[in-house]
Amino acid sequence: MVGADPLLVALDFDGTLAPLQDDPQDSRALPEGVRALRALAACPAVRLALISGRGLADLSPLAEVPEGTWLIGSHGAELGRRTAGGGLEVAEGVDPAGRARLDEAAARLEPLTGDGAWIERKPAATVFHTRLVSDRQEAARRHAAAIDIGRAMGMEILEGKNVAELGISSVTKADAIGRLRTLLAPERIFYAGDDTTDENAFAALSPGDVAVKVGPGRTAARWRVADPAALCALLGRLAALLG
């Protein structure tokens, strides 16, 4: 993978660069990862991107990424780029026509909240979290009920770790990989992610690309690292090779 051909290093954020937190607003990229991304950005043949389920407005202030890094939010429905001084240039946002459906979804999910279950609003999805529900059987029941609500409304459903997303967009991280491939024309792609939603991105990679699963669980990725700290160390080694 070392050479002069363009390499796209694309990464999930939560659970990949940043350890998972009970409160998503507490998530921060590990310092080792921030340093590795800066080193990779200094390599002329490397392009960087984050692909996240977060909305861009949420992802951008948390992502300590170099200028020029592409940021894809809402699993591929939003596209932007980090500018000088930590700003964000939005190339494509979410069509606001579906906001009423998201409001309705939130209203239907509201009776399932409490005791650690809560709703998060994103530009293209209403998200139901059960990570903080202490009774795991009850958490599973509420999660299933949230999925049923989404299906009844005909919404796009994405399931992650203790989370159910009811969305108005059918795009996935596979679509995000496709957009970046068209936009940047990389010779190879290195993609790392930890969640079930990242499996779509793994499936969109070509035989010459590299897929890295972060953490446990079944995966289509050929390679695996134990946790975000191990992934950041791997990125540091990659930067040293390319540098």
Image (spheres, grey):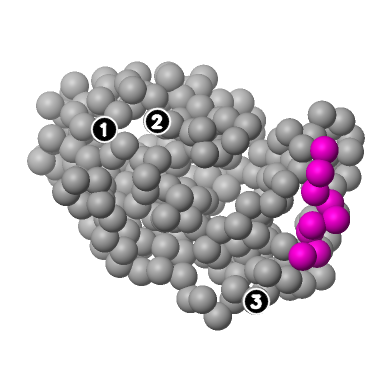
- Where is residue 201? Give x, y as percent: 48, 49
- Name the side, left or right, on which 106 lies relative to 28: right
Q: Which residues are magenta?
A: 107-115
Q: Are marks 3 and 1 in contact (CB under 8 Å)?
A: no
Instruction: Looking at the image, tell me whether mark 3 or mark 2 is earlier in sequence order.
Output: 2
> Mark 2 = which residue?
29
Q: Is residue 143 left or right of residue 225?
A: right
Residue 233 in the image, given as x and y percentages of width and height: 34, 19
Q: Give above or below for 77 relative to 196.
A: below
Query: In this image, 242 relative to 48: left or right?
Result: left
Q: Earlier in the sequence, mark 2 or mark 1?
A: 2
**Could you give the CA–CA distance between mark 3 and mark 1, rounded to whole angstroms?**
38 Å
The residue under label 3 is 100
Q: What's the distance in space between the residues labelled 2 and 1, CA to CA?
A: 10 Å
User: What's the residue at 40%, 30% (across, down)?
Assistant: 29
What's the residue type where badge 3 is placed? Ala
Q: Amino acid at mark 2?
A: Ala
Q: Is residue 203 visible?
A: no
**Mark 3 / mark 1, whichever is N-terminal:** 1
